[in-house]
Amino acid sequence: MKSLSGIDGAFLHLETPQTPMHVASLHLFDLPPGYRGDFHADIQHLMRSRVQLAPVFTRKLTPMPLQFANPVWVEDDAIDFDYHVQRITLPSPGTTAQLQHLAGRLHAELLDRNRPLWRLAVIDGLQSGQMGYYIQVHHAVLDGQAGVLLAQALFDITAEPRHVAAGKPLPAEHPGRAELAAAALKHDAGQYIKLLRHLPEVLKTLGGLFGAGAAKARGGLGQNFSFGPKTPLNVPITGERGYAAVSIPLASLKQLAQGHDATLNDVVLALCSGALRRYLARHGGSPNKPLIAAMPISLRQAGNVEYTTQATMSLVNLNTQIADPVLRMHAIRDAAGAVKALARQAQGVLPTDFPSIGTPWLLQALAALYGRPAIADAMPTFANLAISNVPGPQLPLYAAGARMATYWPLSIVEHGLGLNITVMSYAGAMGFGFTTATAAVPDPQQLSAALLEALHEMQAPRRRVLRKNVVAEALPAA
């Protein structure tokens, strides 16, 4: 039996049918030459042997009496693999766009809390001859970095699957009400002691994240700059989801970073900014006020392999009001650099666990209140979208002998935050995943197209800019 952490519990209690709180990834797999097997059956067999490698697959939730505190994780000894590993066939012609649309539909479905909080779909019928693979896991189980750890358990680094020795079956746990209550009290007592011990450091760090340091990170435009402009992305949402994805060679992005004395993350933010300018220009106009992105900051210490969420959130200025792509890139680079400094300060200080008695009632009430359209529409726009960049595996991965060709992430959207762009590097490519609420973005494929346009614009050698952001001279287009 293991207590659910405070942050993980928040993802659980804030979940509603309109706002599912799971993350996922979508993949294309290249089958080996001459393959005549059943990929769904092979994956199901593989999962039966791999579930012991990660507690994600074997734990389920047991609620506290009257839900007075966070539930606890207990071992499940009766995993239904026919439920957890399903087969879906795409209708003809089986395009990649159809696959991504299907991923959006699957992403709208809530996970069954009476089972371990994961589900996998093997998808055939693609005209390319490849196999699709969609896996979703509740955010109460892991964050982006823990998702990379999970991939190490699921996949192999060669076409020959590694042998996994059969583990000792874990006994199912059935804690009684008294045992559950004692676990909650023990957990909260420990968290109160930790919180009091580290409170001065926590308050100082929070002051940096949301005070003067954060103002610098958001562009130095003053305290009110934390509010972004209202856009079509920032509306009350329903449970319908859309999805689009695109992969860009990592070498191209690194070349851009080198040319602008920037990091890879700066380039990612600049591309997202350019894509949003284009998309909004076609949907009512790009605002004069810059868009603000909510960006997770990992608090995971080196060597930490826990399957929990260990992150906090900060805000970064996307400088979408700047038309020139190079000037915009440099402005984003400077703002993002301040965010990185804050991240180093926050690591190891901000808590990822906290007392939970009473929080399920409070958070569920807040989620229900915020879900009312009038309330969600009246709330100020703290951020216009979420952007997350997760370093992924750089070696090719395999499942049941098939090579993974793409790694496209999916994440969470919320009322007033109808777009989430999550980016994952994998084997020489950067996969951009656009998870959307259909109420905010009816056609997510327009965003992936706009991203490629933004890339082309940044690559075009049309002008030279000095370090102090002074345009020297116009050059002819290549």
Image: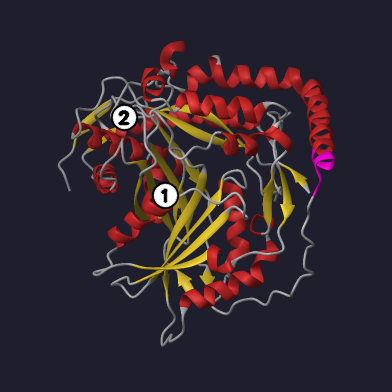
The local crowd at label 2, few if under 14, some if 14 to 19, many if 20 or more residues have their Cα within 10 Å, is: some
Q: Amino acid at mark 1?
A: Lys
State the SS at label 2.
Answer: helix
Q: Which residue appears at 71% of the width and 59% of the height?
A: 76
- Total marks placed: 2
User: In the picture, residue 71 is in which quadrant?
Assistant: top right
* Location of residue 405 in the rendering, given as x and y in whole percent from the top left corner: 42, 66
Q: Specify the amino acid type for callout 2.
A: Leu
| Magenta residues, start to end | 175-180
Residue 177 visible somewhere in the drawing = yes
* Left or right of residue 406, residue 285 in this image: left
43 left or right of 257 in image: right
Instruction: Answer with mark 2 or mark 1, whichever residue precedes in sequence.
Output: 1
- Viewer can see residue 345: no
> Which numbered tag is attached to residue 151?
none
Instruction: Identify which residue is drawn at 37% across, 31% down.
Output: 330
Residue at figure coordinates x 68%, y 34% from the top left? 67
Looking at the image, which is closer to me, 321 or 11? 11
Figure check: 449 above or below 350: below
* Residue annotated with mark 2: 327
Residues at circles 2 and 1 in contact by the CB criterion of under 8 Å? no
Give how far across and how far down residue 465 sits, in percent: 29, 32
Looking at the image, which residue is at 61% across and 50% down?
146
Q: Residues within 10 Å of mark 1 (few under 14, many from 20)?
A: some
Tell me the tag on residue 254: 1
In the rendering, at what x and y percent does residue 291 appear? 35, 26
